Image: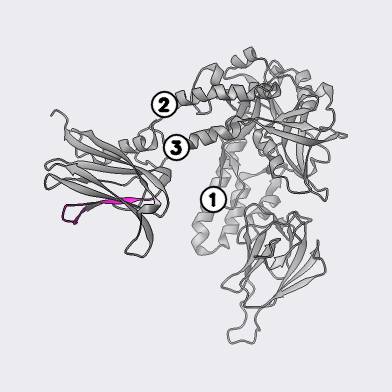
Amino acid sequence: MVTVSHVSGPLAGKSENFDDKKDRIEFGRDPDVCDVVYPADDTTVGRRHFALRREPSGDWAVDVYGDHFVDLDGVPVEPDQPVPSGAVLHLGRSDGPGFKVIVEREDASTKLGLTAIQDKPAPVRVLLRRLAIGGGVVAVALAAAIGGWVVYERAEREAERKRIAATYASLVEKQQELSQAQPRDDAGRIGQKAIDKLVRATFLVFRQDKEGHRDAQASAWVVGPDLLATNSHVAEIGDELEPGEKLFVRQPGAKGATFEVVEWIKHPGYKAFPRYLLGKDTSYLPAFRSSKPQEMIDLGGGGYDVGLLRVKGKLPKDAILEIAPKDEIMALTPGMALASAGYPMEQISGRQVLPIGATPQVRFGNLNALTDYFFLPTDAAHSFLIHHSVPSAGGASGSAIMGPSGRVVAVLNAGNYYFLPHLPRIGVAAGIGYAQRADLVTDMVQKRADAAFEADKSYWDWQMSNFKRGVDAFGDWVLEKHRGNSSSVPEIVSENKGKLEAADLQVGKDGKNQRVKVTRLDMSSGKTYTVFVYADNQTAIKFYLVDAHDQKAAESSGDNWYPSLNFKPPADDSWSLYVVGPDEDTTYTVKIYSWRAKDS
């Protein structure tokens, strides 16, 4: 039996018992699915926050849902972490609603008796905290600690854990080398008065719940009497506030004033640009020859990621930063010295106290490169994406980046990261970050962002001409795969569009619903044909050819979104092409090629 005894929060003093028939205990605010139900207005707890799961051994473990916070005996839990009897868990925050879990095991008098007490490995995060030295982690000690932890893992996970430990240690070591390699004279190239003003202008963005608890979120900087500049993805926090929550900014310093955010404004291109890319089927690029057509290049780079926060009250006049004028923006050059101030807080010690007294971190780097939002070189007018080496972490989003003139030239918004199982994300050792050019903020402040953004759309269409559509990029790879010899030359015979619709629904031999569309193909004997079908949205499809006597003559192998085959007709005839896909609307393209000798 499992007993959940609530020690703090709205259910304090209450106990709930679950018998041995119960293999899963759900915690949250949704009474329809949760076994332990918190009040609907206690938004510290998620609707479905987490669950306790009985293992085959009879022990209990944690199932974490998304990014919901669960604390076990003072340490954030890991996925699948065991929960010993007597453990105290807190939800939402380390001081959030808490309860003790008491597990009564089977009677030791049973035939097999109880299993002997086992060694208990410490969770990875516990080891990391024990190894923390001055906000950093010693890579060699980390590898050794994780290696010791690996010994206690189940045998089938040992190889994976060792690989993760070695990779993590290597990445941390590379980051330390990169940090030591940063130029030390950058501060001298931007005047101290400008740096002092940058610090004064850099405000902390934090979220406050209805109980007054504060959570630091990001960075912003003063651009007007009641206006701060930041990222669109920071301004978007305002759209996510739950009832009773508010958004604030805090002035830096021991006695920094707090201002409530009453309006959050996103750049019109922030949502429109990714929608445009998705609508253009531009995920696959022919910019390199590859035997792996699944390789994709992600475009966009957080396009137009600038925003504004309007506050109640007047901000200090001496904190307003000047944005570089257009001619200075157009003259930005790789190698230029940069300085930024903000609140990096991801895996950074002391982030919890930032809402009490905000201390911005000043960081230096250089401008690495200038591109458009397609990551392509272009003219100065469209080089909106700044690649830089200013160190950052989660929380620095929205920071102003200052040039040698002491004026703001960019807004920090993104970086590159490794993602490893069970570990925090790690910045890529190359140290390449991204920022939005500051004239985008000027457009918003002067209320001309909509007009400027509309003018950019013609540039998008022009730049898209450099990209092949997915079907064309895959077509090159398919032809290479089916080429008989190096002297064979493909010729396009036909190209047609089709769509699997509700009217094409059939029940397959396996009893599952599928959609089938039939078209006719005329092919001649003595020739080799390549038949290639490409499905939009990566829908898994297949196809086969049927002769005039309803006999299957050829069939594509496997299910993917780009099946193909070579076919040599035994006679001049008309063949039926059956395209088969799942029970969902799917558009596809059929391309038929024939092959001839190079000199014929």
User: Which of 510 and 433 lies nearest the eye of the viewer?
Assistant: 510
Dot 3: few (<14), some (14–19), or many (≥20) neighbours within 10 Å? some
Q: Is residue 260 magenta?
A: no
Please provide percent x and percent y for residue 589: 33, 41
Secondary structure under the numbered disc 2 in the rendered image: loop
The amino acid type, in three-letter code, at marker 3 is: Ser
Task: Examine the rendered structure and indicate whether residue 379 appears above or below residue 507.
Answer: above
User: Dividing the picture into quarters, in which one does residue 483 lie?
Assistant: top left
Q: Residue at x 62, y 49 (%)?
A: 142
Q: Picture coordinates of residue 330 (x, y %)?
A: 59, 15
Residue 479 falls in image quadrant:
top left
User: Which residue occupies the foreground of this view, 380 or 545?
Assistant: 545
Picture disc at residue 164: 1
Q: Quadrant of the N terminus?
A: bottom right
Q: Nearer the viewer, mark 3 or mark 1?
A: 3
Q: Earlier in the sequence, mark 2 or mark 1?
A: 1
> Looking at the picture, does residue 473 appear above or below residue 388?
below
Q: Residue at x 62, y 71 (%)?
A: 59
Residue 292 horizontal/vertical position (percent): 37, 41
Give the residue type that dot 2 points to. Asn
Q: Residue furthest front?
A: 503
The CA distance from mark 2 to mark 1 is 39 Å
Horizontal and vertical percent position of residue 141 = 63, 48
Outermost residue, top direction? 327
Front position among marks 2 and 1: 2
**Magenta stretch in the rendered image:** 540-553
Residue under numbered circle 3:
283
- Mark positioned earlier in the residue sequence (3 or 2): 3
In the picture, the disc for residue 466 is 2
